[in-house]
């Protein structure tokens, strides 16, 4: 007797004709069950299994005239599309490009949608920082990401000194003086706070009764905040003791890359120099110097300026921090 099988809770009849269709239904069913035993997900493989299932069910519907099989094929097509999008958000590569491609598969910290939100935060911070100073902008960015959901967020003295080194107390005082930040006590008390007892600070412009500048959930907030801290606090950047403006440039470049690590949209061929300089609180003619520091620190693999654009490529080790355009 010919072998029968099962796929998507449906029995594949042992006498189903043509024989090649019977096998094309049985084999994906076996493959799905094998996939469920995997200890690690493989979204590219799963997307291909859904596509194969969709093709087989469409053929089965044609042979049998059963409309429910066609509905099952449509469900499989949607599942394949969703899984492919998840894979591309995670790795920056379409499913079809993963086999035999010459680019490495990268597990990225941000999905493409989260990268869009991250760039919106960068733009907002650049537009609304109370002082045009690199240290202030860096603090505003990182505190904004702590408080973006409710207008309040927890910080410690350790956070501030890791972000700003010896400038932390001065910058905090500036933010309080500008009424951009409100503290429950004194600046000295915030600087003395420890991780087990953080200080809850308030950013008035982010309170719920104000117009909401961002629309993303708590999970995305946490992911974007972690991404920003990893970018500005990278080990090699700290080792080189790079200043706030250079670390802001590191973050800005990471937020604006293509899947191959190159900066900017393909059609632009790079990042607009004036926009990058404005975010980093630098004169445009000083961006070259700071980009060179990032090359030395192994953050950028290469960098040059031509035609009003910053051209270059993120170092491969930093690709996981890349926010895909």
Image (cartoon, rainbow, N blue to C red):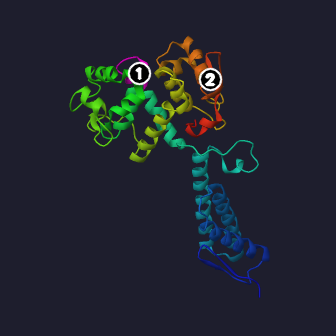
- Residue at horizontal 59 percent and vertical 55 percent from the top: 83
Check residue 126 for magenta coloring.
yes
Which x, y percent locates residue 198? 29, 39
239 or 230, which is in the foreground?
Answer: 239
77 or 98, which is in the foreground?
Answer: 98
Q: Is residue 63 visible?
A: yes
Q: Which badge, 1 or 2, comes first in the chain's sequence? A: 1
Vertical placement of residue 28 versus 98, above or below: below
Quarter of the image for the C terminus: give it: top right
267 or 40, which is in the foreground?
Answer: 40
Nearer to us: label 1 or label 2: 2
Vertical placement of residue 149 versus 239, above or below: below
Determine whether, in the image, residue 279 is placed left or right of residue 312. Answer: left
- Residue at horizontal 30 percent and vertical 29 percent from the top: 191
Q: Residue furthest bottom?
A: 1
Q: To which quarter of the image does residue 35 belong?
A: bottom right
Spatial CA distance of label 1 from label 2 is 22 Å
Instruction: Identify the residue under disc 1.
Output: 135
The part of the chain drawn in magenta is 125-137
Vertical placement of residue 298 versus 208, above or below: above
Q: Is residue 255 visible?
A: no
Determine whether, in the image, residue 35 is placed left or right of residue 279. Answer: right
Circle 2 Cα neighbour tier, 10 Å, few/some/many (<14 / 14–19 / ≥20): some
Instruction: Identify the residue under disc 2.
Output: 296
Quarter of the image for the N terminus: give it: bottom right
Circle 1 Cα neighbour tier, 10 Å, few/some/many (<14 / 14–19 / ≥20): many
Q: To which quarter of the image does residue 201 belong?
A: top left
Which x, y percent locates residue 28? 69, 69
Which x, y percent locates residue 84? 62, 53
Check residue 28 for magenta coloring.
no
**Type of secondary structure dominating the magenta stretch:** helix
Which x, y percent locates residue 223? 46, 43
């Amino acid at each position: 007797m010919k072998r029968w099988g099962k796929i998507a809770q449906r029995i594949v009849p042992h006498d189903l004709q043509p024989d090649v269709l019977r096998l094309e239904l049985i084999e994906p069913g076996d493959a799905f069950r094998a996939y469920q035993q995997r200890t690690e997900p493989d979204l590219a493989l799963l997307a291909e299994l859904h596509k194969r299932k969709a093709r087989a069910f469409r053929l089965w519907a044609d042979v049998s005239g059963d409309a429910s099989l066609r509905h099952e094929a449509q469900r499989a097509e949607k599942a394949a599309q969703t899984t492919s999008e998840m894979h591309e958000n995670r790795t920056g590569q379409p499913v079809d490009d993963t086999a035999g491609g010459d680019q490495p598969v990268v597990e990225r910290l941000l999905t493409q949608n989260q990268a869009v939100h991250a760039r919106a935060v960068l733009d907002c911070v650049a537009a609304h920082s109370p002082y045009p100073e690199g240290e202030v902008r860096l603090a505003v960015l990182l505190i904004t990401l702590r408080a973006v959901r409710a207008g309040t967020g927890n910080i410690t003295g350790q956070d501030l000194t890791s972000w700003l080194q010896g400038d932390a107390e001065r910058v905090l005082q500036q933010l309080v003086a500008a009424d951009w930040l409100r503290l429950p006590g004194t600046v000295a008390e915030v600087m003395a706070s420890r991780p087990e007892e953080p200080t809850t600070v308030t950013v008035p412009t982010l309170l719920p009764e104000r117009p909401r500048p961002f629309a993303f959930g708590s999970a995305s907030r946490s992911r974007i905040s972690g991404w920003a801290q990893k970018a500005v606090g990278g080990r090699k950047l700290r080792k080189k003791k790079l200043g706030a403006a250079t670390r802001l440039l590191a973050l800005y470049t990471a937020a604006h890359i293509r899947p191959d690590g190159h900066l900017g949209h393909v059609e632009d061929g790079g990042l607009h120099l004036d926009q990058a300089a404005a975010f980093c609180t630098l004169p445009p003619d000083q961006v070259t110097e700071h980009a060179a520091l990032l090359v030395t620190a192994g953050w950028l693999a290469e960098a040059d300026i031509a035609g009003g654009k910053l051209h270059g490529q993120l170092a491969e080790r930093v690709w996981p921090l890349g926010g895909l355009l």
